Image: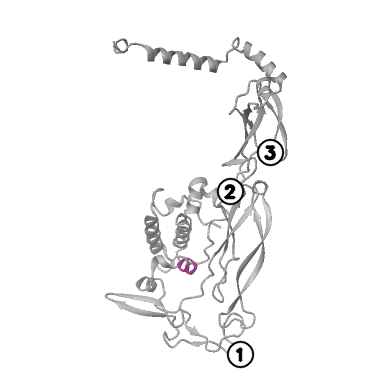
Amino acid sequence: MATTKRDLYEVLEIQRGAAGDEIKRAYRQMALKYHPDRNPGDKEAERKFREAAEAYDVLSDEQKRQRYDRYGHAGLDGSAFHDFRSADDIMSTFGDIFGGGLLGDLFGGGGGRRGPRQGPDLLMRLEISLAEAARGATREIEVDRQEFCGECRGSGARKGTVAVTCNYCGGRGQVVQTRGFFQVATACPSCGGEGVKVTDPCPSCHGAGRVPQRARLRVDVPPGVETNMRLQLRGQGELGDVGAPRGNLQIQILVRKHEFFERRRNDLHCQVPIGFAQAALGAEVEVPTLDGPEKIQVPRGAQSGDHVRLKGRGMPDISGRGRGDEIVEVVVETPRQLTPRQEELLREFAETEHEQVSPRRKSFFERLRDYFTEEDEPEDRVNA
């Protein structure tokens, strides 16, 4: 759950149009200021430290940022905020921003072996229908990910043996290089930062400590989701180090194109063709809705492009606040082929049509007459 409901730009003290580098710089300053190691026992500083991390987690991700800019916190609840469990979790997630060396020393790194890292997030795409997006759905998915080897329990060493301390780094997991006035700590190239090495690897996993498996998971898709929105299953991502939690599973939603409807925010738009006589006389016609076919009344004298609005028949809002409308656009079709009798009736109608000119046609012909009158006026008269 998010720590803050404050405006995320306000949290990092930046403007809404801030560029990526400016966002990163602002977060780095906040993290340095409120890190718990600099403010021991200060609960307010700890809260602000997590608050800044949550703000950066959203604003540094282009898709999350667009969602937040459009819907605010309502577009992020339950899906977009990373659940930062501790300062170490935050530093491991955004460690590339701070680097090693002096900053590592400042935050208690001291060039020593790092702690267990949380597993990385996984991303998969889930395609659903518009009806599922409207009503919500429960889907089963399959995810290929790593599991700890059952033979060695994740150690990578043959059963009955143990890993040995890395001679290159002395078990620290890091090597320190001096560059001018600075000291830079990097992961040990021999043990990869683990501090230990496997000399007799497990035959089941060949020393990796983990094996690939396919997991079956259930996903609850909330009503109102849109294409490119992400759902998050916490703790269902890739494995972390032994003793560390898994990453999260990010599920990107793709809503299939519908045969009749086009979604515009929470409204659904559809076009319904009607005949010339139906448009002139008015008619009751059947239109599609997400809940099944429904009859609407097309008013007498309807024109192509006229709309009939069905209140509350669109998509639900993702935040649970109401539902959009269905907007039916009338399209008047002119018949391409006529029977002799139809042609006869239309010719009779055409002979009497001049007796009743619509306001739109009358206005058009008046403006057209004025246009040609102005074009025909002599130049000296126009310039007088």
In the image, what residue type sits under mark 1?
A: Gly
Q: Could you classify mark 1 by the number of other residues whose Cα lies within 10 Å: few (under 14), some (14-19), or many (20 or more)?
A: few
Pick whichever, 198 or 164, lies toward us. Answer: 198
Q: Which residue is mark 2?
A: 226
Amino acid carrying mark 2 in the image: Glu
Q: How many marks?
A: 3
Regarding mark 3 in the picture, which secondary structure is present there? loop
Q: Residue furthest front?
A: 340
SS class, disc 1: loop
Dot 3 crowding, Cα within 10 Å, few <14, some 14–19, many 20+: some
Q: Residue furthest left?
A: 180
73 shown above or below 101: above
- Alpha carbon distance from label 2 to label 1: 52 Å
> Can residue 30 be seen?
yes
Whole-angstrom CA distance, mark 3 to mark 2, is: 18 Å
Q: Position of residue 52 (x, y in %)?
A: 45, 58
- Residue 90 in the magenta stretch? The answer is yes
Q: Check residue 295 for magenta coloring.
A: no
Task: Return the residue at label 1.
Answer: 160
Magenta segment: 87-92
Mark number for residue 289? 3
User: Toward the viewer: 339 or 370?
Assistant: 339
Please indicate whether residue 121 sits to the left or right of residue 38 in the image. right
